[in-house]
């Protein structure tokens, strides 16, 4: 029986990306020792930095709770912290898959993932040169005023199905201003992509705005 540390868990609704609106059982694994994160000082999950933050449970208990909430074919969302740094990461994926749950992983991409999953979200917190997970279902980039060229290079150099730009949403920030700046950037990126012929390169995929709908719904 594999123990794990986590800072929050429970049934909720996915608010960002292609699976927005889908009920998922979330588990936020403890631990993130990556000091080079570009937004570490602004991280809204700083409580998850320590590998022993929060509460202790077992892989079996997490899978059982997810099965009780959602049943066979339901979604288990594994996030962090940086979930790949938690010793229970791979045992949890294996146990969830064997039980019949679908697995959604959200990671910063600082480590390559060698495990079966049904949906992989990479939200990069490192420069493109340091990104180790360069493919998956979606990339969700937190917009902090990066240049259009920086963002376009992310889509040129990686192989995701969808590319999302998300506002930086923190307490005390001007959320609407951040959201408008993000929307403006999405318009510019797609105009540039069309001009550069990148849509053909990515089979018509475009940059999309990640709405973070859970913030408006008032759920975690």
Image: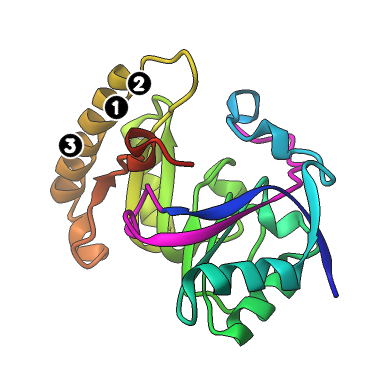
Using the image as rendered, state which of residue 112 and residue 177 is in the foreground: 177
> Which quadrant of the view contains residue 156?
bottom left
Q: Which residue is mark 3?
A: 187
Determine the CA span between mark 3 and mark 2.
19 Å
**Marks 3,2: beta carbons within 8 A:** no
Q: Which residues are magenta?
A: 14-38
- SS of the residue under disc 3: helix
Determine the CA span between mark 1 and mark 3.
13 Å
Q: Which residue is rendered at x = 46% and y = 73% of the image? A: 74
129 vs 155, left or right, is right
Q: Is residue 42 above or below residue 13?
A: above
Mark 3 or 2, nearer chain start: 2
Magenta portion: prevailing SS class: loop
Q: Which residue is rendered at x = 17% and y = 37% of the image? A: 187
Label 2 Cα crowd, 10 Å radius (few <14 / some 14-19 / many 20+): some
Using the image as rendered, state which of residue 184 and residue 9 is in the foreground: 9
Q: Residue 39, position in %: x, y? A: 58, 29
Q: Which residue is mark 2?
A: 175
**Marks 1,2: beta carbons within 8 A:** yes
Q: Which residue is rendered at x = 65% and y = 73% of the image? A: 64
Q: Which numbered disc covers residue 179?
A: 1
- SS of the residue under disc 1: helix
Q: Residue 15, position in %: x, y? A: 37, 47
Q: Which residue is rendered at x = 50% and y = 48% of the image? A: 123
- Specify whether residue 142 is painted magenta: no
156 vs 48, left or right, is left
Quadrant assignment for the N terminus: bottom right
Q: Is residue 216 above or below residue 95?
A: above
């Amino acid at each position: 029986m594999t123990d794990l540390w986590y800072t929050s868990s429970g049934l909720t609704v996915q608010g960002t990306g292609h699976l927005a609106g889908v009920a998922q059982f979330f588990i936020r694994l403890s631990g993130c020792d990556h000091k080079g994160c570009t937004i570490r000082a602004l991280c809204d999950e700083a409580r998850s930095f320590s590998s022993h933050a929060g509460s202790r449970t077992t892989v079996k208990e997490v899978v059982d709770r997810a099965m009780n909430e959602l049943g066979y074919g339901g979604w288990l969302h594994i996030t962090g912290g940086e979930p790949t740094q938690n010793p229970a990461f791979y045992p949890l994926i294996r146990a969830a898959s064997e039980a019949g749950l679908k697995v959604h992983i959200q990671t910063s991409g600082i480590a390559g993932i060698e495990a079966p999953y049904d949906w992989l979200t990479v939200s990069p917190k490192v420069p493109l040169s340091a990104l180790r997970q360069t493919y998956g279902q979606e990339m969700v980039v937190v917009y902090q005023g990066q240049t259009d060229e920086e963002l376009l290079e992310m889509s040129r150099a990686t192989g995701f199905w969808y590319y999302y730009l998300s506002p930086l949403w923190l307490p005390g920030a001007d959320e609407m201003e951040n959201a408008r700046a993000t929307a403006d950037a999405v318009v510019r990126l797609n105009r540039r992509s069309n001009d550069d012929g990148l849509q053909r390169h990515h089979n018509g995929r475009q940059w999309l705005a990640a709405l973070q709908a859970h913030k408006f719904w008032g759920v975690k």
